[in-house]
Image (cartoon, rainbow, N blue to C red):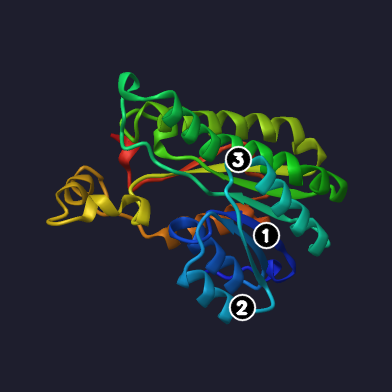
Amino acid sequence: MITYPEFSQKIVVGTGCASGIGLAQAELFLQQGATFFGADLNQNEALKELKQRYPKTFYFFKCDVRAKEEISAFVQTVLAQAPKIDILLNTAGILDAYTPSLETSEELWDNIFQTNLKSIFRLTNAFLPTMLAQKQGVIVNMASIAGLVAGGGGAAYTASKHAIIGYTKQLDYDYAPKGIRANCIAPGAIKTPMNQADFVGEATMAKEVAQNTPARRWAEPSEVAQLSLYLASQAADFIHGTVMPIDGGWIEK
């Protein structure tokens, strides 16, 4: 594993930290010596174990990122405890079961957009003033290959991930001259609890996805976390407003 000594002095905020990519990000940044403030709708054993391993540098807050008042409470608590905010990882997200437009209810559409997109907007705007006052800050948003091509999700999910990419580009364009750096990641097939249904029984869907991926496998959440670490590091200082696919070659087809 590549080490970045610079993270020992960094304060990181991340959503979706109870499982999958978000949990892998929390673990990796903590291993690098960062202080991590995590938020998730769920509280589980993985988080308890993380707190036991990093009692002085890991802080967890139960938060529904769809709820404005819960985000506000989370942000206020973090800002009261943290002397600065160096990195924001907007990772929380949900799938829409590949639901096409005619079968997508307004409730499903709103739930996907509240979780995947509006939470990013709210959290970014909440922490951005602090970053601007510091004249530095890094934001890494979680998009998807569904933000680049069709077929990675249903109507709502695909639209929300396309929107994340557009929002990230505009965010960086507007604030890069003031010391802010924003990028997003576009994962392909990653072994996370969100994709657990693909592995049920004989794992027919999981095998089909792997077969259709040039790399012929699914990725581990830790691989996406490693990319997050790089994008947040000083080594990536000249990478601005971009979307980084990590998909085993899926979109090259």
Name the residue type under label 3.
Ser
Residue that badge 2 annotates: 54
Q: Looking at the image, how many numbered discs can be counted on the residues?
A: 3
Residue 155 horizontal/vertical position (percent): 38, 26
Kindly state the secondary structure of the residue where label 3 is placed.
helix
Residue 1 can be seen in this image: no
Task: Answer left or right for 68 relative to 96.
Answer: right
Where 124 falls versus 102 (above or below)? Answer: below
Pick the residue in front: 142 or 76: 76
- Figure quadrant of residue 37: bottom right
Q: Is residue 193 visible?
A: yes
Q: Residue at x 47, y 71 (%)?
A: 46
Mark whose residue sits in front, 3 or 2? 3
Residue 206: image location, x then y, percent: 21, 50
**Disc 1: CA contacts within 10 A as few (<14), some (14-19) or many (>=20):** many
Query: Which one is nearer the viewer's eye here, 177 or 76?
Result: 76
**Identity of the residue drawn at 67% across and 39% down:** 122
Instruction: Give the CA distance from mark 1 to mark 3.
Output: 17 Å
Residue at 54% x, 49% y: name it. Answer: 91
Q: Which residue is mark 1?
A: 12
Q: Quadrant of the C terminus?
A: top left
> Helix, strand or loop at disc 2?
loop
Query: Depth-wise, is mark 1 or mark 3 nearer the camera?
Result: 3
